[in-house]
Image (cartoon, helix red, strand yellow):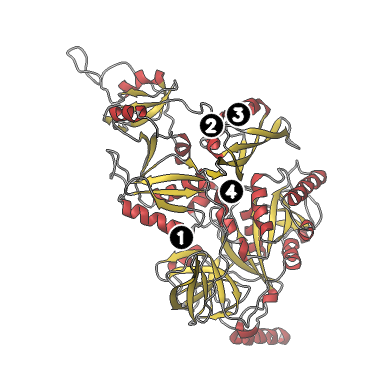
Amino acid sequence: MAAALLLRGLRSAASRTRPAYPLPAYSTAPYVSPLLRRLYSSAAASAAASPSLGPGGALDPSRIRNVAVIAHVDHGKTTLMDRLLRQCGADIPHERAMDSISLERERGITIASKVTSVSWKENELNMVDTPGHADFGGEVERVVGMVEGAVLVVDAGEGPLAQTKFVLSKALKYGLRPILLLNKVDRPSVSEESCNEVESLVFDLFANLGATEEQLDFPVLYASAKEGWASLTFTKSPPDNAKDMSALLDSIVQHVPSPDADLEAPFQMLVSMMERDFYLGRILTGRVRSGLVRVGDKVHGLRSTDDGVQKIEDGKVVKLMKKKGTSMVTVDTAGAGDIISMAGLSTPAIGHTVSNSDILSALPTIELDPPTISMTFGVNDSPLAGRDGTHLTGAKIGNRLMAEAETNLAINVLPGPLSESYEVQGRGELQLGILIENMRREGFELSVSPPRVMYNTERGERLEPIEEVTVEVDEEHVGFVMETLTHRKGEVMDMGPVPGTAGRTRIFLTCPSRGLVGFKGIFSSFTRGTGFMHRAFQSYAKYRGQLGNVRKGVLVSVGKGLITSHALMSLEARGILFVSPGMEAYEGMIVGEHSRDSDLDINPVRTKELNNIRAAGKDENVRLSPPRLMSLEEAIGYVAADELIEVTPKVIRLRKKYLDATKRKMMKNKPMD
């Protein structure tokens, strides 16, 4: 008993002499804003001893490990992060705790990279959860420069897929030595032989991507993130005393090198992430490249330009913060090798350098892949504009897009072809669709053009973006996939049965990005949700020619008013309707898909004439088929070049670019330049 009291007293004395790290967010430390407290709800308790402190009160760099978790979509990254946090004593409020954005929780995908840290056996592990979808590749590119290692998560049943190759290529490019984690080994279809086969496929992938001999000598672990365990050897169910993530955490400490850091050098940090807070302003997150930084230090922001390094702002550090588990804690000092967040500067953005006032050299900026598609965002000018939204003007739309471009480097915003319009360039339909969905939830009304592929010209030859496509379907749907993608200029590279699954076929293709626009919706509908399709950008290649006929014509309204069941009853035979009785229509609005390849003008607001024999509302019982109501992603993939999407907080409508039928005919007959 006396020994226990003495030990408690020593711990208490040590905690009084230790710096403010890691104070919980709810302590008497300087004020933490409600936004940060909401995102990171409670203080994380460490499962092991706290890391050692180096000179100046900062963490000892030799005890720091910076590691990113990378994987293909749905291979288990975020679930793995949950188990690692729980293993290290963090309070997990719900499953997928790192998915803090509402759209991430709704769709089950990771959209933005997140950074957190945990303590394990006197080491500080800074963990980065990254998206797996290629459309959000910019999130991967801007954070892999912060870390020295990566955990490559691969589904033991599916093996490496298109986006596995994408995220792995980024890690190898920065010289990282990944740790291979074969996840979901507890599935019945997974065996030790299939795991060995997947490991061989991953090794071949490393070799094809130009990995060094050191990178090819990667450690392999087996895990079930859902069950919360990892093992150094293949097993379906480890012993009860080994059902945890200790093996993976120990491997990270053993195989990921500590950062090459100099605490005596002047302070420098490259901004890799940025968020806004109502009270603190800009919160800049990045890895400290050298030196120490303390609250109250004078710093300035620098950026590299064609004319050299430019100073953009002078200021001082108002607050230093660090994400610990699922909470945000305040610190007084941070040193080289650590990943921290700071407040106090209002101008620097992602890719800029924050340093001591006597440093005038900027750190190398982040290299990003170029965007492949663009869409035009403009003011909603339909007859029904202004009824649902609160942000209607071109200036507000422009300010919102510029703010998005600051936090997401994979998006470029340029002036559009018309006044109060903006060209937004991105990586894919999903990325821009997420941006549009966020804007409509914020109260914006806007009109959006269909996605256009961005071509390159090299030596007078037209080049277009080509994507790798992996399709997994039942055997009965193979013919449909082959025929449809052939019309879209797809070329089959390989195909074969899916290991461990009877009656399933996996097809590997290359296809132009323009040919894949709108294909996902058709694919999911035809396969009734049983098919899987993954795609990732491969390279720019020679233009493959005009696409085949990928869509029929549309039914266009020539009337204005409420849609009637009497009118729709006679129009059902013309095609598939997108509207139902009681909805409002206007001239030029698209109300359905024509059964033929040409557009057809119709009047969906026609009412039955009142006469002296029968009343206008009394007639035979009208039975209509349910309309096809499109989601935002389906609408983006559906609209043609002469059409627009009208986006409001409540509804999504399709319309012609020119509402007047006469003007549409004039523009159709106008000779192309």
Give the mark toward the camera: 2 or 1.
Answer: 1
Under tag 3, what secondary structure?
Answer: helix
Q: Quadrant of residue 630?
A: top left
Give the mark toward the camera: 4 or 1.
Answer: 1
Q: Pick out the residue farthest to the top.
A: 613
What residue did someone put label 3 on?
486
What residue did someone put label 1 on?
406
Query: Tag 3: residue type?
Result: Thr
Q: Is residue 556 above or below residue 230?
A: above
Is residue 349 visible in the rendered image? The answer is yes
Return the disc, 3 or 2, that comes first in the chain's sequence. Answer: 3
Q: Nearer the viewer, residue 388 or 673?
A: 673
Q: Is residue 66 above or below residue 381?
A: below
What residue did someone put label 4 on?
133
Q: Nearer the viewer, residue 359 or 537?
A: 359
Q: Quadrant of residue 97?
A: bottom right
